[in-house]
Amino acid sequence: MIHFINNSIISTEVIIMSYEERIRHERADMSKSFARLADFLLDSYIEASFMTASELAHALNLDAATVVRFSQHLGYKGYPELLREIRDKVRRDLLIRPQQAENPTSIPGVVDAAMQSLIRELEQTRMSLDTDALARLVDEIGQARRIIVLAEAPAQPAAYNLVYFLEQGGFQIYIARPSVVDLARTIHTTQPNDLLLAIDVSGLSPNIARTLSAAQARGIHTATIAGAASLPSTRAADVVISALERPSTQIGAVIVNVIIYILVEALRWAFADRFAGAEQAITELSTQIQLIED
């Protein structure tokens, strides 16, 4: 069977090929621009999986239209369809990559197995992280009168890290106490221009999701940074940033800390003047306090 795409004849044989097979099939007859794209997508496909058409074109000193034409030349409707296949390959590679030290017999073997597992999860997080949701959370934090953090036990270190960094930017933020009465008191005293932010690693504390739901019912802005997309807290928040597909207390805690780090860097970028001003004010106050003590 023959298919026509943008006046090009594409055989069924090519359509059922992977993007790598299509590239290799056409590589010898490609123009210099197409060949440059082809080689990059074969050699640096992980990097390419994070690029828009414009970013890919800029990296190779081409124009975005060339990237689109290249995609269509391979039989795709456009670059988004090609990009989806590249990302699917990256996900498959991450899922089926063999672990060299599945059953470690030494401390170095344990270290190697742990690092491989962590790297694999970090790559998956990088692939699946919703940057639009991250941007929304940055905006919510910037506009909030106060940020109240809900954190289950495994998420406490990440919560304290977030509080420490945001206080440096002059944000009003604190961690709510975890008892039911204290959570109820928190919701009662929270106002619509506050933000209730949950940090949920494992989903083992059902009160996190229940508190978010109760806050939503009162018109309070809610968000969650979750260790897995399947946790109940992700279904009870206006803004959701999740890491793993399946909950894992150990790896999830690490990944959530990584997301907190990314969030803080995004906030430092978005509110650079605010952080700089707060840092200067804190330095001046510290000097005054030291002079009083002396």
Image (cartoon, grey):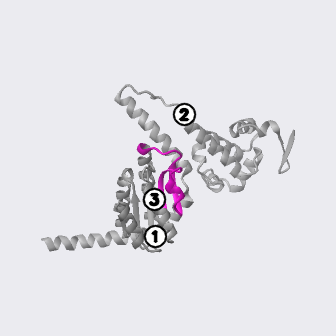
Q: Which quarter of the figure has residue 37?
A: top right
* Residue 248 is a magenta residue: yes
Residue at numbered disc 1: 142
Q: Amino acid at mark 3?
A: Leu
Q: Position of residue 68 (x, y in %)?
A: 72, 52
- What is the distance, in whole Å, between disc 1 and disc 3 at their CAs? 12 Å
Label 1 sits on a secondary structure element that is helix
Left or right of residue 235: residue 62: right
For residue 263, the mark is 3
Q: Amino acid at mark 1?
A: Gly
Label 2 sits on a secondary structure element that is loop
Which residue range is magenta in the image? Answer: 223-250
Q: Position of residue 57 (x, y in %)?
A: 65, 53
Is residue 64 at all visible to an observer of this figure? Answer: yes
Q: Earlier in the sequence, mark 2 or mark 1?
A: 2
Q: Nearer the viewer, residue 116 or 141?
A: 141
Q: Position of residue 248 (x, y in %)?
A: 45, 44
Q: Residues within 10 Å of mark 1 (few under 14, many from 20)?
A: some
Residue at numbered disc 2: 97
Q: Does residue 42 sit above or below 275 in this rendering? A: above
Q: Earlier in the sequence, mark 3 or mark 2?
A: 2
Q: Residues within 10 Å of mark 3 (few under 14, many from 20)?
A: some
Q: Amino acid at mark 2?
A: Arg
* Residue 87 is a magenta residue: no
Question: Which corner quadrant holds the N terminus?
Answer: top right
Q: Residues within 10 Å of mark 2 (few under 14, many from 20)?
A: few
For residue 5, the mark is none
Left or right of residue 256: residue 14: right
